[in-house]
Amino acid sequence: MFGIVGIPVTEIAIAAQATGIKYVGMRNEQAACYAASAVGYLTGRPGVCLVVSGPGLIHALGGMANANMNCWPLLVIGGSSDRNQDTMGAFQEFPQVEACRLYSKFSARPSSLETIPAIIEKAVRTSIYGRPGACYIDIPGDFVNLQMSKSSVKYVECCLPPPVSLAERSAVSAAASVISHSRQPLLIIGKGAAYSHAEDSIRRLVDQCELPFLPTPMGKGVVPDNHPNCVAAARSRALLHADVIVLLGARLNWILHFGLPPRFRPDVKVIQVDICAEELGNNVRPVATLLGDINAVTQQLLEEFSRSLWKYPSDTEWWKRLRETMKNNEEKAQALALQKSLPMNYYTVFHHAKKLLPKDCFLVSEGANTMDIGRTMLPNNYPRHRLDAGTFGTMGVGLGFAIAAAMVAKDRTPNKRVICIEGDSAFGFSGMEVETICRYKLPILIIIVNNNGIYNGVDADSWEEISKFGEPSMCALPNFLLPNSHYEQVMSAFGGKGYFVKTPEELQNALKASLEENQVPSLINVMIDPLSARKQQDFPWLTRSNM
Ligand code: TPP
């Protein structure tokens, strides 16, 4: 349970601890809600976000919206004004149940204390059944200290795990037939596949059928990025020329350019595998729809291919073109990474990080260039080990996600590191959660890739010049932030280790030092060229960031 206490929920947090629920006190409800939703993604059971009434709940709405967009389970419990003060202008009064309806699958207030267990069960069940999402429960202040006899409580057993649904057999055969007749097939692995723990079956599908695959940002690691069939380094070309695309828990939304030309062939045949019926047919009319659990449906496909023994030939023109493009793109990125000039560019920073970061770490990332370039440069080897701005493109998720990952790791894999790679703007959205990280001594390493701005910034001299023209609010571009900000001092202010680095050597040393100190949170503030950008792109639509 993550939250911020106050009237009327302090007692709920204390009671939760008394029953053995961990309570993590955060500094803003938005970050608390992001953290709770990330626990839902990582564990398949909703984390809880506990908030006070009115403004507390309103801060959490961002986290609820983000969870719904990502299809992650989440339970928000909000205190609200006493029932006999409703509509009277009570302290922090707000129509909370109504407000949460837009941001949740289920939003309700129990009618009495006795019904709380039943309503919690329904909220938990709703959050994880079907397409996962956020649920809200409203607890009026006067409930909190009400007395009742234990015998009148209607205890309810926790819901059964979500039922696993299979696709129609005819749809599976149709999909297998389309795939086996394709000349340029492509599997796209989304975070839905990660959520459904489909890693073993998808890995077998890739290996058995020798198919090229492309992960979406949080689908990375379902099959390791270093698998020879991963064509992430030729993403645009793979999307543009594939004649058959199999979507495994990935949606044809903005992240996949809606599945439409000019980014895709107009005649591309799409096979959709999804848990949600309403998702099927969005933007492109599919040739086959496989409604069901991604893991179970992938196993159905595997059975079908085991009968036919079909595999995609390894010597096709398609493979040749994909491999050439990958090699070309990797060489371009490598050339930028090895540039010696200072200040460093993005590629140099990630090149050094890649060499030193543990292979099994959680990677949390947000920012525009920082996140986009980092995604291409830093490999993921394990499923559910990448958390980022996601489907909603939300800045501010990073530290909450990192705290959630560290809390989950603490219980299950205690030595696992959480690396949180932030743009300097992105860090600003939830920077005070560094105090939370230090309070709970979480082994999180924050790396800020600092270009003094949003997308781009200016150096200190240019900032001085600009300031001479008048008020920065009138003269400075809206994306500029204060040059050379010492964000690492936020970390040292709370007892963690802070590093300010300008050269590759300083970066390497800071990385080594912070990774050695396993239990000390640290922050490396890496100054880069304020004008550093993505490498030259082959397609005009890739020259500007999407967010
Ligand atoms: N507010 C929210 C909540 N989400 C957003 N996506 C934005 C604003 C718009 N936005 C997109 S990326 C970004 C912002 C503010 C920050 C990019 O700058 P930075 O984090 O420094 O990364 P950089 O691109 O400079 O590496």
Image (cartoon, rainbow, N blue to C red):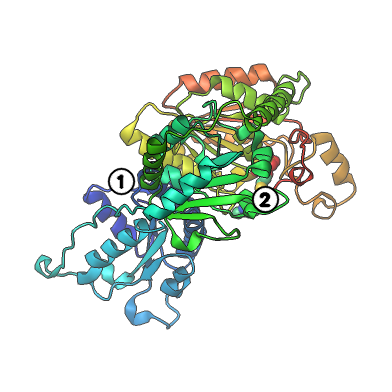
- Vertical order, 311 against 436 (above or below): above
Q: In this view, does 135 lie to the left or right of 116?
A: right
Question: How many residues crowd mark 2 within 10 Å: few (<14), some (14–19), many (20+)?
Answer: few
Horizontal and vertical percent position of residue 23: 33, 48
Q: In which quarter of the image is residue 308?
A: top left
Q: Is residue 438 left or right of residue 156?
A: right
Horizontal and vertical percent position of residue 359: 48, 24
The residue type indicated by label 2 comes to: Met
| Residue under pointer 2 | 547
Tell me the distance, in whole angstroms, between the alpha carbons under discs 1 and 2. 35 Å
SS class, disc 2 = loop
Q: Quadrant of residue 82?
A: bottom left
Q: Earlier in the sequence, mark 1 or mark 2?
A: 1
Horizontal and vertical percent position of residue 527: 70, 30
Residue at position x 77%, y 23% from top? 342
Horizontal and vertical percent position of residue 358: 48, 23
Marks 1 and 2 in Cβ contact (< 8 Å)? no
SS class, disc 1 = loop
